Structure formats: C-alpha cells, structure tokens
Amino acid sequence: MAEKTVIAHISDLHCGSRYHIPSLATRVVDELNALEPDIVVVTGDLTDMGYRGEFRQAQHMLDRIAAEQRMILIGNHDARNVGDVHFEEMFGARRCDLVTPEMRLIGLDSSEPDLDSGRVGRETHRWLRERFAENPDQIKVVAMHHHLVPVPGTGRERNIVHDAGDLLRVLADADVDLVLCGHKHVPNVWRLEDMLIINAGTCCTHRLRGRVRPSYNIIEIDDDGDHVRVLRKEPFVDAEPAAEYHGIHKSVCGWRHDDIVGNEP
Ligand SMILES: [Fe+2]
Ligand SMILES: [Fe+2]
C-alpha cells in the first residue's frame, strides 16, 4: 500500500476578533497534535486587524501545534494596518516553497495592503511556472488566502483574486493537483480541470454565515499521487469525507452537496 502524506489545512483564526473562541482554538491544537499531520497549512487571516498583539496570539496558538513542517500564509485581515511587517517577523516570507520527496507545496501571498480584495500578480505567475517545471512528476499543491473560484454561500462575488483567470491557466498548465484556500469561512471543494480546489472554513471563530460551523480540512495524499481524500473536521466532531479522487481520472465522488449555508441556490 502506498505511503501517504497528511496535510492539516486550517484557516481564518482571526485572533483579536470578538468572534475568536479560545476554547475552540485549544481544541483544534489538541486534535492536530493527536492527528500528527506531516504538514500544517494555514491559509491566512491569523488576525483580525493586523495588530502586533493579535499576531502574538496567533503565534502562541500555532507554536503549540507539533508538526514536522508548516506553511503559514497571510490573509487580507493580516495585511491591514501594515500587519505584513509583523507577519514577516514572526512567520517568515509571505511567499514560500516547501519541497518533500513526493510533493511541491507553494504558498502565495494573495493580499494587498489595506484591501480586502486579492491578487497574485504576473511576476508570481512566471515564478510558479518555473518552480513547477523543475520536477513535473511531483504532486503539486498551491495554497493562498483568497478564493481561486467562486464558492457557494459567500455572497456577492468579490472574493476571488483579480487575476483568477490567468492564474487558473498557469495552474492548469502546470498540472497542479490541489489548490488550498481560505477567506470567507465556507468549506467547499470544486473540481476544475484536473485540480481539486479546496476551501477551508474558519477553525476557531464564530464569524460564520448561515448554518456553517467552524471546521478545518484533513487532506490525505498517497505518495504516488494516485489517491487524494479530503475530510472535513469540525472541532469535537468526527471527521467526514468531503471529496476524493482516484488515479488519472481524478473522478470526484462523495462531496456532500448538502446546503450548509442554509440558502437554496
Ligand atoms: Fe477570514
Ligand atoms: Fe479573508
């Protein structure tokens, strides 16, 4: 049986917000430490307003998660009030590249200073093409805060990056397997071309729309890239299968199309 890589995908901690729930944060940390994932990916909005004390609180939470590797990305809330200065000091570069023998995981900065909207940019498109061309056989994963494609139940569309079309072209051409996003706190999985585009909810806040509950994702990837399983995990509740694909056909099955937001489309 193939070995697998387990990615814990958490997002939108919003430390400093009155909707941030410390007991939920503690529970998520405990659950992740029991899970022992290979990689923890945090897709942004660590803070609510980009203030230093909020980043300290996020750092305190994230440092308690024992994972071999982690990737922490900036969100629009973190980029408020020149928060990128604190982000870089505490968490490192806003764009990062994590390579394992089986996988290349690239984290992008989709934020813009003091704006809620997002953009990746042409320079980064070129950089992505070059990075992914280095080893075409690796499993390819991209993570960023803003949405790559629209997500149901997130209101008027202003959440995808401004250059989503061009970025989609780059990612599809590079045969990217998975894209991980956060931002509007609604968990979702879309399949587009041969990619799974996976949004995480907020893991530890009550900044929630409709009937959505706090959650995070657990992503299991066979090291031969032949099987990917996405589990949605609400704190205190058993994980539920959200999507999976098999082999070269990458046929998605099992995504729960229940209306978690509460609005009929
Ligand atoms: Fe958020
Ligand atoms: Fe956000």
Image (tube, grey):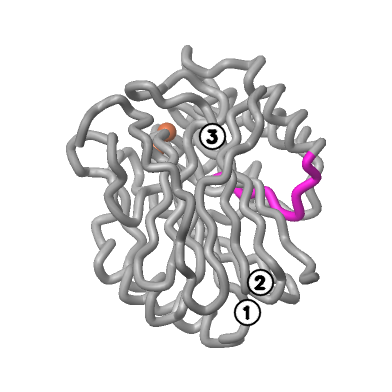
Q: Which residue is mark 1?
A: 138
- Please rate how many residues cluster around mark 1, counting C-alpha atoms within 10 Å: few if below 14, some from 14 to 19, many from 20: many
Q: Magenta stretch containing residue 41, yes or no?
A: yes
Please state which of residues 48 and 157 is positioned toward the viewer in this rendering. 157
Work out how far the residue at label 3 is from the one at label 1, CA to CA, in angstroms: 29 Å
Q: Quadrant of ligand 2?
A: top left
State yes or no: discs 1 and 2 in contact (Cβ < 8 Å). yes
Q: In the rendered view of the protein, which quadrant contains the N terminus? A: bottom right
Q: Secondary structure at mark 2?
A: strand
Please state which of residues 9 and 191 is positioned toward the viewer in this rendering. 191
**Residue type indicated by callout 3:** Leu
Q: In the rendered view of the protein, which quadrant contains the C terminus? A: top left
Q: Secondary structure at mark 3?
A: loop
* Residue at image coords 24%, 57%: 162
Q: Magenta stretch containing residue 137, yes or no?
A: no
Q: Which residue is mark 2?
A: 103
**Residue type indicated by callout 2:** Met
**Residue type indicated by callout 1:** Gln
| Residue 66 appears left or right of 46 | right
State yes or no: discs 3 and 1 in contact (Cβ < 8 Å). no
| Residue 142 appears left or right of 66 | left
> x, y percentage for residue 18?
47, 12
Q: Secondary structure at mark 1?
A: loop
Work out how far the residue at label 3 is from the one at label 2, CA to CA, in angstroms: 25 Å
Q: Which residues are magenta?
A: 35-42
Q: Which mark is residue 46?
A: 3
